[in-house]
Image (cartoon, rainbow, N blue to C red):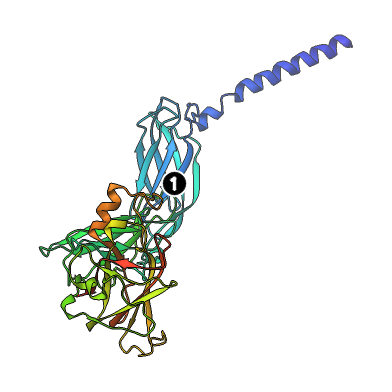
Amino acid sequence: MKRLLLSFVMLSTILVQMSCDKYADDYKNYLDNKEIVYPGQARNLRYYAGHFRTKLVWNPSPDPNIAYYIVNWENGNKSVQVAASTHNPIDSIQVVIPDLTEYVYSFSIRAYDRDGNASIGQQIQNVRVYGTNFQSLLLNRSPNRQNPYSINEDNKVLLHFNAPDTLNVVTEISYSDNAGKEKTVRLSQKQNSIELPDFRFGSSVSYKSGYLAEDNGIDTIFVLASEVYPEIRRSIAIDKTKFHEFNLPNDAGPDWGWVITNLWDNNFGEPGYHTPGRDLPLSFTLDMGEQYELSRLKVWQRLSGLYNYGNPKRFEVWGSNNPSSDGSWGSWTKLADFMTRKPSGLPVGSVSDEDRKVAEQGDDYTFPNEIQPFRYLRFRVLETWGGTNYVHILEITPFRKE
């Protein structure tokens, strides 16, 4: 009986083996007698945002048999083939996908070897493409409305802007030069001012800001419309032959024979104007003869005591067209607060060659851009460099807007 059972088991094993051998290669009928080969995958698939386009970047597979990659989007309805230019996994392969609409896309990528075998697909989702809707939300970088521009003695214009938004990377400024040629300069994110050395006065300036939609974006996307910069007007010295003395009851008056008319005699040496010793603040007033819209002011210190003694350090300038005869301040408008800067920063009593050079040219001050025209000017000195109770100045020259 045992011998019969053993024979039956052996027969069954042989039959099962024969059956397995019969079907073992049946899968080849479905694979056309070929093996399935999966090439290595691309790694670290990422994107960089653009304007109606995007850039895809990945690290290649080290598989040396990979010949190209295919990128698909819009559910596989669109694709692009990218050559496998490198197999070094520390390198990068990239492709720019153009002519996209403003939308959020998904892309897939497969690697293909020389025999056409494809890797398992990879996807990158939430790829945002920017366009007109995004542009409509952008704003131009704003000029400094309190001080939109300054003009130096060579009539070179310096435009002043407020600090930019984080993604505002550049502002393009268009203007006409002295020859009437249109020019464009670029104000970077790190700059708040830019010079127009050859600006044609009487012409306009326009500006348009550009943004990166995302960090490391591939396109600078500009605001849809340019804006016109505040009007730039030339600064010219006022004719001082029209100036007159104008004494008010509580003004300081003269001392040491240094009278106030010396302030506008175009003599930049001594004597100048010297007040008596009185408690600060000290004031003095002049009549310019006509109303002017002021732009700048230059003040020449007493050179024998630069940044010392009675030379003004802090002072105010006030304007009026109908000053009260009693010397009260109710009929006056404060135009500006000014502080004299010492280039070297050395302590009182010490001056550098640069200090002397600047003082000889006159200390330069700029009035706020939008002030009404005034005829009478009143100076109110709050502090002198030497901490004295008197003030001395050699010359002043106000400038007006043309």
Q: Residue furthest top?
A: 3
Residue that carries the numbered disc 1 in the rendered image: 47
Name the quadrant of the N terminus: top right
Name the quadrant of the C terminus: bottom left
Whether residue 211 is situated above or below residue 402 in the rendered picture: above
**Rendered residue at 28%/58% (across/down):** 194
Within 10 Å of the Cα at label 1, are there few (<14), some (14-19), or many (20+) other Cα atoms? many
Whether residue 267 is situated above or below residue 37 in the rendered picture: below
The image quarter in which residue 109 lies: top left
Q: Amino acid at mark 1?
A: Tyr
How many marks the image carries: the answer is: 1
**Rendered residue at 39%/49% (across/down):** 346
The image quarter in which residue 272 lies: bottom left
Residue 218: x and y, percent?
37, 49
Residue 206: x and y, percent?
26, 67
Q: Residue furthest front?
A: 256
Residue 239, can we see it? no
**Rendered residue at 39%/82% (across/down):** 250
